[in-house]
Image (cartoon, rainbow, N blue to C red):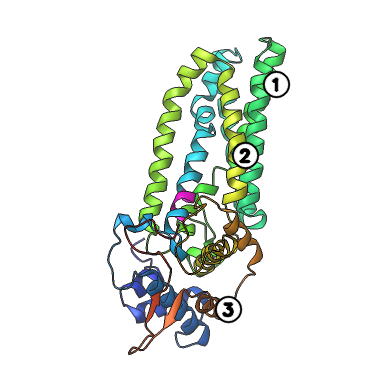
């Protein structure tokens, strides 16, 4: 890893323009003085300046809790909620305790339960591998919704087959545990952890990384991703600790609980999670700016702060659906049209500043 270059955004943020240009050119197979390379550098510099991150080595945590056109708080909460839902949907109740579930709930012999636990991990790995080929084709929203439906219906199958208490019915519960892990592996396993490779690098052919990082702009990405990861492990710990107690005390009610929890995810995903498939980081910035401005129009607001219905996410989902995929030139033009950046006077690179209303650090204005 010592030979890997720094990301171009990191280099350009710190004013190392020549090194940033070299990395951009290497990723795209271009010369550093080519038009495409220079345009990409300019777009990244505009994005850095617009975020207020230029020249900084860190961002205060309070910046994550701001909104306005940049919607830092909303974007952070989308990442946090995806990690939360991944855990409380019951994945680790199944993964950690699969052999125990077969012994206690389905009454299988110890060795059989261990063998089926190994088979479960094989099924898990196969469907997890398949997810790599589905994410960019199907998109995030569809996989979130399909996975939630698959997990919820699997839990319905498990608890309904355990209610009679017969060995024959218990076999149906075993099928439900396998379909659950298949649904999870193909959808919810990678989604909170991955993002569009084109958005975190400059090549659409590189492996994917973090989904919460995809949603957040450079200014708040590290803090927002850290908070989402905290959410993951906190609720991982909670589910792992309470699952044995639930099985011992309420039996099949444990699976009914997870079925209801998964069903409750559907409205949130449908109304609040914008599609980011094949979007660059700059396009994602524009999606949230467009959604914020569209919502202002719907609520009849002027240029003042948006105070009402801060929780609504449908405007952002609609913005992602309506906004076409943009070229680098179109991204720059749209950012100026949306009022994200203003061109000013300066030496060398053009000076840009954010115009996001209510985007004041340490406030929740403009939500």
- Magenta span of residues: 75-79
Main structural element of the magenta stretch: helix, strand or loop? helix
Asked if residue 78 is among those painted magenta in the image, a careful observer would answer yes
Along the line of sight, the residue nearer the viewer: 293 or 297: 297
Along the line of sight, the residue nearer the viewer: 197 or 334: 334
Q: Which residue is mark 3?
A: 330
Which numbered disc, 1 or 3, marks the residue that appears first in the sequence? 1
Q: Residue at x 44, y 23 (%)?
A: 242
Quarter of the image with the C terminus is bottom left
Q: Tell me how far mark 2 sits from mark 1, CA to CA.
A: 20 Å
Which numbered disc, 2 or 1, marks the residue that appears first in the sequence? 2
Q: Tell me how far mark 3 sits from mark 2, CA to CA.
A: 35 Å
Residue 247 visible, this orientation: yes
Q: Residue at x 67, y 31 (%)?
A: 153
Q: Residue furthest right?
A: 168
Residue 205 visible, this orientation: no
Q: Which residue is mark 2?
A: 148
Find residue 351 and report its horizontal and vertical position in percent.
37, 83
Find residue 72 and report its horizontal and vertical position in percent.
42, 58
Which numbered disc, 3 or 2, marks the residue that appears first in the sequence? 2
Quarter of the image with the N terminus is bottom left
Mark 3 and 2 residues: CB-CB less than 8 Å, in contact?
Answer: no
Along the line of sight, the residue nearer the viewer: 147 or 18: 147
Q: Residue at x 28, y 69 (%)?
A: 56
Q: Tell me how far mark 1 sits from mark 3, CA to CA.
A: 54 Å
Decide: few, some or many residues near mark 3? Use Cα within 10 Å; few <14, some 14-19, many ≥20. few
Asked if residue 287 is among those painted magenta in the image, a careful observer would answer no
Q: Which residue is mark 1?
A: 172
């Amino acid at each position: 890893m010592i030979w890997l270059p720094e990301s171009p955004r990191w280099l350009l943020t710190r004013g190392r323009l020549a090194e940033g240009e070299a990395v951009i050119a290497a990723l795209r197979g271009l010369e550093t003085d080519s038009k495409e390379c220079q345009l990409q550098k300019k777009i990244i510099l505009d994005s850095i300046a617009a975020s207020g991150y230029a020249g900084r080595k860190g961002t205060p945590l309070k910046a994550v809790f701001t909104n306005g056109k940049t919607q830092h708080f909303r974007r952070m909460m989308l990442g946090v909620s995806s990690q939360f839902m991944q855990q409380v949907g019951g994945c680790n109740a199944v993964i950690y305790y699969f052999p125990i579930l077969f012994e206690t709930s389905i009454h299988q012999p110890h060795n059989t339960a261990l063998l089926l636990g190994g088979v479960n991990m094989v099924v898990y790995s196969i469907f997890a591998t398949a997810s790599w080929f589905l994410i960019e084709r199907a998109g995030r929203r569809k996989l979130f919704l399909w996975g939630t439906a698959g997990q919820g219906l699997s839990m319905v199958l498990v608890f309904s087959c355990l209610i009679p208490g017969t060995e024959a019915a218990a076999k149906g519960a075993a099928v439900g545990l396998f379909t659950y892990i298949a649904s999870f592996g193909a959808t919810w396993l990678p989604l909170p952890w991955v993002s569009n490779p084109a958005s975190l690098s400059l090549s659409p052919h590189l492996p994917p990384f973090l989904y919460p990082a995809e949603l957040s702009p450079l200014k708040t990405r590290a803090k927002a991703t850290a908070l989402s990861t905290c959410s993951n492990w906190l609720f991982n710990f909670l589910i792992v600790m309470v699952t044995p107690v639930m099985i011992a005390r309420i039996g099949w009610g444990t699976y009914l609980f997870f079925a209801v929890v998964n069903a409750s995810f559907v409205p949130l995903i449908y109304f609040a999670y914008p599609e980011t498939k094949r979007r660059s980081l700059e396009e994602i910035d524009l999606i949230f700016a467009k959604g914020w401005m569209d919502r202002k129009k719907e609520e009849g607001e002027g240029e003042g702060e948006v105070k009402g219905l801060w929780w609504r996410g449908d405007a952002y989902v609609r913005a992602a659906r309506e906004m076409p995929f943009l070229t680098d030139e179109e991204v720059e033009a749209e950012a100026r049209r949306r009022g994200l950046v203003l061109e000013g006077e300066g030496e060398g690179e053009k000076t840009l500043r954010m115009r996001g209303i209510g985007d004041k650090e340490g406030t929740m204005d403009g939500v």
